Image (tube, rainbow, N blue to C red):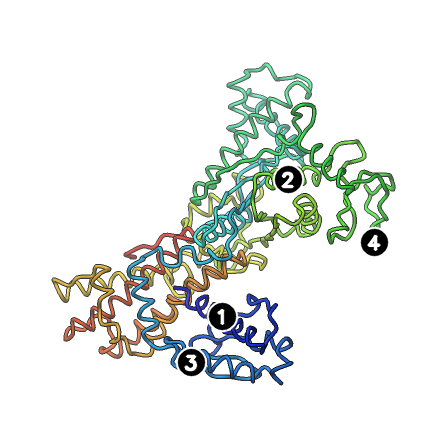
Amino acid sequence: MNIYAEFHVRIAAILDRFAKQGRLPRDLDLARFVVEPPRDASLGDLASNAAMVFAKEAKATYANPRQLAADLAIQLTEEPEVDRAEVAGPGFINIRLKPRVFTDILREILVEGVDFGRGAAGRVAAAKINVEFVSANPTGPMHIGHGRGAVFGDALAGLVEFAGSQVTREYYINDAGAQVDVLASSAYLRYLEALGDKVTIPEGLYPGDYLKPVGAALAEKYGDRLRGKPEAEWLAPVRDLAIDAMMAMIREDLAALNITHEVFFSERSLHVRHNGVSDVEAAIDELRAKKLVYEGRLPPPKGQLPEDWEDREQTLFKSTDFGDDIDRPLKKSDGAFTYFASDIAYHRKKIEAGYDVLVDVWGADHGGYVKRMNAAVLALSGGATTLDVKLCQMVKLMRDGEPVKMSKRSGDFVTLREVVDEVGVDAVRFMMLTRKNDAPLEFDLARVIEQSRDNPVFYVQYAHARAHSALRQGRAAFADLDLSATRLAAADLALLSDESEQSLLKYLAQYPRVIESAAAAHEPHRLAFYLHDLASFFHSHWNRGKDQPQLRFVNQDSRDLTCARLALVTGLIHVLASGLSVLGVKAPEEMR
């Protein structure tokens, strides 16, 4: 049960009843208000701003929000689960629930196990979501910055999938730009090197050792047949083999993070003509048919003019009709299509595939591209498809507080694979989610392997392992203790009367709401924060038991109390394991 969603429905029903009685207008948008945990837990279990949200519509009947809140509170006290409902401040409603509500939710957790909370956003989840993430240029191994987008995108996909959506993970291969020609030139030098020539990698090409195997593969495949040939003859075969090799490397890097994509989409395919028309041309033709493409001149950019700026007539997309700052060029001065034209065609393919929501995970340096892409999706879909662009800030890699910058393998950056190999998959994945995606992140290689509360991934995993140790203690104390879901769900959970036990119960009950809100906002860091807070509640309670033996999970004098407390521990295990699994992190039962 999502108790917050349940009471949203009940308050909405009361408001609807008021509307039918003439106390409120009949056309209220009953989704506008929220039901959430109060900021101060001493005030109750639920809080709602419903009376304040509808104060304007209610002013014909109610002089102020507190009066509407008072009427709502009276109705809420008639609900069988409500102990009391009170008005606070300018019109908030604080609701305290009867203790059995939370013990019933614990029983639900015990029965459903790690599936508790699954489908929590079913009532608001989109049917089909495409999450396009990583999409690093196929020019070398992934670096730690790529890793943040990779983890964020995969965790987001896992989150919305768990919440109830149908998800496709997609990788856009940027294999049509100038960067892959630079890759080919770099690989060609490594090919000559493999043939025995002495080569120097000039500035502007890729210097990393990772291209040496590509050069060797070219030498094995072509012998010396490409040596000394004009670029026009060797560029295409070298480029194709190099791209394939780089994508194989990138797939291996992603696999090291336990990430797989269902779709790898080639940018070059958008320029291949089918029946005389490429996908890029077809997309522009569609926009032209909607009278959204024209030939015109753009005003000069503000400030100092870029060296490559030209005052010329261009093929332009009317992106300002959809909220962009200026209209955007679709062709370069040489007649070739712009990157933006290719991106329009690419998103058109996703719209045609029937996705309700498109999520693009980009680096923060692409922030200036967001408005034009939103405009294109709105124009192509007529508003039927939503685009949500998530920008990931860079990662500052540290070791004991000192920056880490160089890698022989890559030439000028530390590869993602090197980081994963050093600190492990779980540390990389969880640490990438300890900040909101658009906030800078420091990743300290020394900190993430510490076994301390300052290491978030250790702190959460240790809570899971510690909880399992409590179950082992229970079995040791009572040899025939039945810890099956059926037995634990039948335990006398009213015995869980201590304040910190009640806090744990109530925080476990928040899990479906966290899943729903994090999925709706496309913010997996919310789940990471919740898991850390839940672990903190548990560790705090465990530590209280060190000083107060009567609070320990295993009570030698009472099998019933032990069973009730181990039911709480098992509920915690299920929620921690579920949340960690959604984020792609292991939940160990033991830790050294």
Q: Residue at x 51, y 19 (%)?
A: 220
- In three-dimensional space, the C-alpha distance between marks 4 and 3, rounded to whole angstroms, equals 61 Å
Q: Amino acid at mark 2?
A: Arg
Q: Secondary structure at mark 1?
A: helix
Q: In the rendering, which numbered label is found on residue 13?
A: 1
Disc 2 marks which residue? 348
In this view, the residue in front, 418 or 381, is 381
Name the side, left or right, on which 488 lies relative to 255. left
Return the x and y of residue 299 as percentages of the image width and height: 86, 48
Disc 4 marks which residue? 302
Return the x and y of residue 210 as percentages of the image width and height: 52, 34
Q: Amino acid at mark 1?
A: Ala
- In three-dimensional space, the C-alpha distance between marks 2 and 1, rounded to whole angstroms, equals 41 Å
Q: Residue at x 74, y 52 (%)?
A: 324
- In three-dimensional space, the C-alpha distance between marks 4 and 1, rounded to whole angstroms, equals 54 Å
Considering only vertical position in the picture, is 9 above or below 447?
below
- In three-dimensional space, the C-alpha distance between marks 2 and 4, rounded to whole angstroms, equals 31 Å
Check disc 4: other Cα within 10 Å, few if <14, some if 14-19, many if 20+: few
